[in-house]
Amino acid sequence: MSSIVLFGPPGAGKGTQASAIMQKTGLPQVSTGDMLRNALANQTELGLEAKEYMEAGKLVPDELIISLIHERLKEEDAIHGVLFDGFPRTISQAESLAKITTVSMVISIQVPDEKIIERIVGRRMDPETGEIYHVVFKPAPEELKSRLIQRKDDNESTVRSRLEAYHSQTAPLADYYNKLGILENIDGDQNIIEVTNSIINLLV
Ligand code: AMP
Protein backbone atom coordinates (compact mmCIF):
# COMPACT_ATOMS: atom_id res chain seq x y z
CA MET A 1 0.00 0.00 0.00
CA SER A 2 1.28 3.44 -0.87
CA SER A 3 -0.17 6.81 0.01
CA ILE A 4 0.05 10.42 -1.17
CA VAL A 5 0.36 13.42 1.15
CA LEU A 6 -1.09 16.82 0.27
CA PHE A 7 1.04 19.33 2.10
CA GLY A 8 0.82 23.10 2.50
CA PRO A 9 -0.42 25.94 4.69
CA PRO A 10 -4.08 26.33 5.62
CA GLY A 11 -5.99 27.83 2.68
CA ALA A 12 -3.52 26.62 0.05
CA GLY A 13 -6.32 24.71 -1.69
CA LYS A 14 -5.51 21.20 -0.42
CA GLY A 15 -9.17 20.23 0.01
CA THR A 16 -10.10 21.51 -3.45
CA GLN A 17 -7.20 19.70 -5.13
CA ALA A 18 -7.91 16.53 -3.16
CA SER A 19 -11.08 15.96 -5.21
CA ALA A 20 -9.11 15.97 -8.49
CA ILE A 21 -6.48 13.61 -7.08
CA MET A 22 -9.14 11.25 -5.75
CA GLN A 23 -10.76 11.11 -9.17
CA LYS A 24 -7.44 10.42 -10.85
CA THR A 25 -6.04 7.86 -8.40
CA GLY A 26 -9.11 6.38 -6.72
CA LEU A 27 -7.45 6.89 -3.34
CA PRO A 28 -9.83 7.93 -0.54
CA GLN A 29 -9.20 11.34 1.05
CA VAL A 30 -8.22 11.28 4.70
CA SER A 31 -8.51 14.78 6.14
CA THR A 32 -7.68 14.96 9.84
CA GLY A 33 -9.33 18.42 9.99
CA ASP A 34 -12.62 16.97 8.67
CA MET A 35 -12.36 13.98 11.02
CA LEU A 36 -11.84 16.28 14.01
CA ARG A 37 -14.73 18.56 12.97
CA ASN A 38 -16.98 15.48 12.68
CA ALA A 39 -15.83 14.25 16.08
CA LEU A 40 -16.63 17.64 17.54
CA ALA A 41 -20.05 17.79 15.86
CA ASN A 42 -20.80 14.36 17.37
CA GLN A 43 -19.51 15.49 20.77
CA THR A 44 -17.16 12.51 21.06
CA GLU A 45 -14.42 12.49 23.68
CA LEU A 46 -11.84 13.11 20.95
CA GLY A 47 -13.83 16.01 19.53
CA LEU A 48 -14.19 17.66 22.91
CA GLU A 49 -10.51 17.20 23.64
CA ALA A 50 -9.52 18.70 20.26
CA LYS A 51 -11.96 21.65 20.45
CA GLU A 52 -9.87 24.18 22.35
CA TYR A 53 -6.81 23.59 20.18
CA MET A 54 -8.78 23.94 16.96
CA GLU A 55 -10.54 27.09 18.07
CA ALA A 56 -7.22 28.64 19.10
CA GLY A 57 -5.60 27.72 15.77
CA LYS A 58 -3.13 25.40 17.50
CA LEU A 59 -2.19 21.86 16.54
CA VAL A 60 -4.01 19.05 18.31
CA PRO A 61 -1.53 16.86 20.27
CA ASP A 62 0.26 14.24 18.17
CA GLU A 63 -0.96 11.22 20.22
CA LEU A 64 -4.61 12.04 19.46
CA ILE A 65 -3.96 12.49 15.77
CA ILE A 66 -1.82 9.39 15.44
CA SER A 67 -4.39 7.14 17.07
CA LEU A 68 -7.09 8.64 14.83
CA ILE A 69 -4.99 7.78 11.75
CA HIS A 70 -4.19 4.30 13.07
CA GLU A 71 -7.89 3.53 13.32
CA ARG A 72 -8.70 5.09 9.94
CA LEU A 73 -6.05 3.07 8.09
CA LYS A 74 -7.55 -0.17 9.39
CA GLU A 75 -10.68 0.48 7.33
CA GLU A 76 -11.25 -1.54 4.21
CA ASP A 77 -11.03 1.34 1.71
CA ALA A 78 -7.53 2.26 2.93
CA ILE A 79 -6.01 -1.03 1.87
CA HIS A 80 -4.32 0.34 -1.28
CA GLY A 81 -3.26 3.60 0.35
CA VAL A 82 -4.97 6.93 0.95
CA LEU A 83 -4.66 10.61 0.13
CA PHE A 84 -3.72 12.46 3.30
CA ASP A 85 -4.94 16.06 3.51
CA GLY A 86 -3.68 18.09 6.47
CA PHE A 87 -1.67 15.19 7.89
CA PRO A 88 1.15 14.79 8.87
CA ARG A 89 1.68 18.23 10.40
CA THR A 90 4.70 17.54 12.62
CA ILE A 91 7.91 15.53 12.21
CA SER A 92 6.69 13.21 14.95
CA GLN A 93 3.45 12.52 13.02
CA ALA A 94 5.49 11.82 9.86
CA GLU A 95 7.74 9.40 11.74
CA SER A 96 4.74 7.56 13.16
CA LEU A 97 3.17 7.43 9.71
CA ALA A 98 6.32 5.93 8.21
CA LYS A 99 5.89 2.96 10.54
CA ILE A 100 2.40 2.16 9.29
CA THR A 101 2.33 3.04 5.59
CA THR A 102 4.55 3.93 2.64
CA VAL A 103 4.29 7.48 1.36
CA SER A 104 5.18 7.57 -2.34
CA MET A 105 4.69 11.29 -3.03
CA VAL A 106 4.27 14.52 -1.08
CA ILE A 107 2.61 17.29 -3.07
CA SER A 108 3.44 20.63 -1.51
CA ILE A 109 1.13 23.50 -2.51
CA GLN A 110 2.60 26.86 -1.58
CA VAL A 111 0.81 30.23 -1.29
CA PRO A 112 2.19 33.43 0.34
CA ASP A 113 0.79 34.29 3.81
CA GLU A 114 -0.93 37.56 2.73
CA LYS A 115 -2.95 35.68 0.11
CA ILE A 116 -3.88 32.98 2.61
CA ILE A 117 -5.49 35.41 5.00
CA GLU A 118 -7.77 36.92 2.34
CA ARG A 119 -8.59 33.47 0.98
CA ILE A 120 -9.55 31.99 4.34
CA VAL A 121 -11.40 34.91 5.87
CA GLY A 122 -13.74 35.04 2.83
CA ARG A 123 -14.28 31.30 2.71
CA ARG A 124 -17.86 29.99 3.13
CA MET A 125 -19.24 26.47 2.95
CA ASP A 126 -22.57 25.09 1.82
CA PRO A 127 -23.35 22.57 4.60
CA GLU A 128 -25.67 20.60 2.32
CA THR A 129 -23.20 19.89 -0.49
CA GLY A 130 -19.83 20.59 1.14
CA GLU A 131 -19.09 23.03 -1.71
CA ILE A 132 -16.65 25.80 -0.77
CA TYR A 133 -17.27 29.37 -1.96
CA HIS A 134 -15.49 32.70 -1.43
CA VAL A 135 -17.27 36.01 -0.91
CA VAL A 136 -15.10 37.70 -3.57
CA PHE A 137 -13.30 35.04 -5.61
CA LYS A 138 -16.12 32.49 -5.96
CA PRO A 139 -19.46 33.93 -4.88
CA ALA A 140 -22.25 31.43 -4.23
CA PRO A 141 -25.48 31.60 -6.26
CA GLU A 142 -27.85 34.15 -4.67
CA GLU A 143 -30.40 31.50 -3.61
CA LEU A 144 -27.79 29.57 -1.59
CA LYS A 145 -26.23 32.52 0.22
CA SER A 146 -28.48 32.42 3.28
CA ARG A 147 -27.53 28.84 4.17
CA LEU A 148 -23.75 29.23 3.86
CA ILE A 149 -21.65 28.84 6.98
CA GLN A 150 -18.20 30.00 7.99
CA ARG A 151 -15.80 27.72 9.86
CA LYS A 152 -15.31 28.93 13.40
CA ASP A 153 -11.52 29.01 12.94
CA ASP A 154 -11.69 30.97 9.66
CA ASN A 155 -11.36 34.39 11.30
CA GLU A 156 -8.28 36.56 10.95
CA SER A 157 -6.79 36.13 14.41
CA THR A 158 -7.17 32.32 14.37
CA VAL A 159 -5.78 32.18 10.83
CA ARG A 160 -2.68 34.04 12.06
CA SER A 161 -2.21 31.41 14.79
CA ARG A 162 -2.75 28.60 12.27
CA LEU A 163 -0.10 30.15 10.02
CA GLU A 164 2.29 30.46 12.92
CA ALA A 165 1.73 26.77 13.78
CA TYR A 166 2.30 25.92 10.13
CA HIS A 167 5.59 27.80 9.87
CA SER A 168 7.03 26.61 13.16
CA GLN A 169 5.78 23.00 13.34
CA THR A 170 4.69 21.88 9.87
CA ALA A 171 6.92 23.65 7.31
CA PRO A 172 10.05 21.72 8.49
CA LEU A 173 8.40 18.60 7.05
CA ALA A 174 9.17 19.87 3.53
CA ASP A 175 12.85 19.37 4.23
CA TYR A 176 12.17 15.97 5.83
CA TYR A 177 10.35 14.71 2.71
CA ASN A 178 12.74 16.45 0.32
CA LYS A 179 15.59 14.45 1.83
CA LEU A 180 13.59 11.30 1.14
CA GLY A 181 13.37 12.42 -2.51
CA ILE A 182 9.55 12.40 -2.67
CA LEU A 183 8.66 16.11 -2.37
CA GLU A 184 6.98 17.81 -5.36
CA ASN A 185 6.49 21.59 -5.22
CA ILE A 186 3.44 23.21 -6.78
CA ASP A 187 2.80 26.96 -7.00
CA GLY A 188 -0.63 27.34 -5.40
CA ASP A 189 -0.80 31.06 -6.20
CA GLN A 190 -2.29 30.63 -9.69
CA ASN A 191 -5.78 29.79 -10.84
CA ILE A 192 -7.31 26.57 -9.57
CA ILE A 193 -7.36 24.85 -12.97
CA GLU A 194 -3.64 25.48 -13.49
CA VAL A 195 -2.88 24.12 -10.03
CA THR A 196 -4.96 21.02 -10.78
CA ASN A 197 -3.21 20.49 -14.13
CA SER A 198 0.24 20.73 -12.53
CA ILE A 199 -0.81 18.15 -9.95
CA ILE A 200 -2.37 15.79 -12.49
CA ASN A 201 0.88 15.91 -14.49
CA LEU A 202 2.70 14.54 -11.46
CA LEU A 203 0.35 11.59 -11.26
CA VAL A 204 0.66 10.25 -14.80
P1 AMP B 1 -7.61 21.80 8.75
O1 AMP B 1 -9.04 21.56 8.39
O2 AMP B 1 -6.67 20.80 8.14
O3 AMP B 1 -7.19 23.22 8.52
O4 AMP B 1 -7.52 21.56 10.33
C1 AMP B 1 -8.27 22.34 11.25
C2 AMP B 1 -7.64 22.24 12.64
O5 AMP B 1 -7.67 20.87 13.08
C3 AMP B 1 -6.17 22.66 12.72
O6 AMP B 1 -6.02 24.06 12.88
C4 AMP B 1 -5.72 21.88 13.95
O7 AMP B 1 -6.19 22.47 15.15
C5 AMP B 1 -6.47 20.56 13.79
N1 AMP B 1 -5.69 19.57 12.99
C6 AMP B 1 -6.04 19.03 11.79
N2 AMP B 1 -5.14 18.15 11.37
C7 AMP B 1 -4.17 18.11 12.32
C8 AMP B 1 -2.94 17.39 12.47
N3 AMP B 1 -2.52 16.53 11.53
N4 AMP B 1 -2.21 17.63 13.59
C9 AMP B 1 -2.63 18.48 14.54
N5 AMP B 1 -3.76 19.19 14.47
C10 AMP B 1 -4.54 19.01 13.37
Image (cartoon, rainbow, N blue to C red):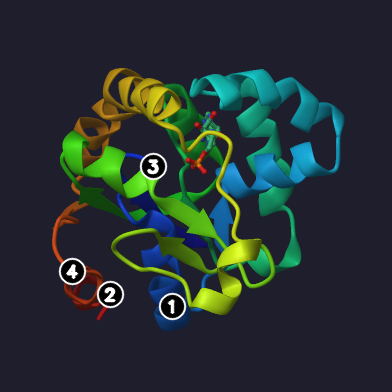
Judging by the rendered image, the residue that carries numbered circle 4 is 191
The mark that comes first in sequence, 1 or 2, is 1
The mark that comes first in sequence, 2 or 4, is 4
Could you say where residue 133 lies in the image, as x and y percent from the top left? Answer: 44, 64
Could you say which is closer to the camera, residue 192 or residue 132? Answer: 132
Q: Whole-Å distance between the Cαs marked 2 and 3?
A: 31 Å
Could you say which is closer to the camera, residue 87 or residue 157? Answer: 157
Asked which secondary structure carries label 2, the reply is helix
- Mark 2 touches mark 4? (CB < 8 Å): no
Looking at the rendered image, the disc whose residue lies closer to the viewer, 1 or 4, is 4
Could you say which is closer to the camera, residue 14 or residue 185? Answer: 14
Q: Can residue 62 be seen in this view?
A: no
Asked which secondary structure carries label 3, the reply is helix
Q: Whole-Å distance between the Cαs marked 1 and 4?
A: 22 Å
Q: Which mark is residue 25?
A: 1
Q: Which residue is drawn at 18% across and 36% down?
A: 114
Q: Which mark is residue 203?
A: 2
Amino acid type at image mark 3: Val
Indicate if the residue with disc 1 has its beta carbon within 8 Å of ligand 1: no
Could you say which is closer to the camera, residue 9 or residue 146? Answer: 146
